[in-house]
Amino acid sequence: MTLKRYVQLSKAIVEEWKQEEKEKWIHSAFIGWQMIGAFGAEIPFGKYLQKLGLEDAPEQPKMSAAEIIAGAEETLRKMREKV
């Protein structure tokens, strides 16, 4: 076997191993998600996976500077109302 082929096979094996490990983590996360749901949390499973870093977040649309400022001002307003 050539070194090039060995490296190709090694990479393929590692990628398969990573995928299997990720699937195990997702199965464990599913159990955790069901448990937090039993305690009243309402979060979609996909979003739960994103928070755990097990799934890529969907690409967010770019916000303009005005939208960012408006959002920050709205957050500050809500915080001031609570205090």
Image (cartoon, rainbow, N blue to C red):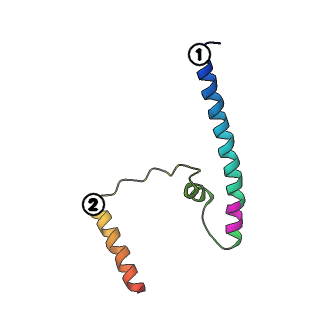
User: Which residue occupies 29% across, 58% down?
Assistant: 64
At label 1, the amino acid type is Leu
Q: Which mark is residue 3?
A: 1
Alpha-carbon neighbours of circle 1 within 10 Å: few (<14), some, or many (≥20)? few
Residue 76 locus on image (x, y percent): 35, 76
Report the label total: 2
User: Which residue occupies 59% across, 16% down?
Assistant: 3
Q: Which mark is residue 65?
A: 2
Alpha-carbon neighbours of circle 2 within 10 Å: few (<14), some, or many (≥20)? few
Q: Is residue 70 left or right of residue 37?
A: left
Residue 55 locus on image (x, y percent): 57, 50
Answer above or below: position of 25 versus 68. Answer: above
Answer above or below: position of 7 versus 80. Answer: above
At label 2, the amino acid type is Ala
Specify the quadrant of the image occupied by residue 74: bottom left
Judged from the image, the secondary structure of the residue bearing numbered disc 2 is helix
User: Which residue occupies 55% across, 55% down?
Assistant: 50
What are the residue bounds of the magenta stretch? 32-36
Q: Residue furthest front?
A: 3
Q: CA distance from mark 1 to mark 2?
A: 52 Å
Q: Which mark is residue 55?
A: none
Specify the quadrant of the image occupied by residue 77: bottom left
Residue 71 locus on image (x, y percent): 35, 68
Residue 26 falls within the magenta-colored stretch: no
Question: What predominant SS class does the magenta segment belong to?
Answer: helix
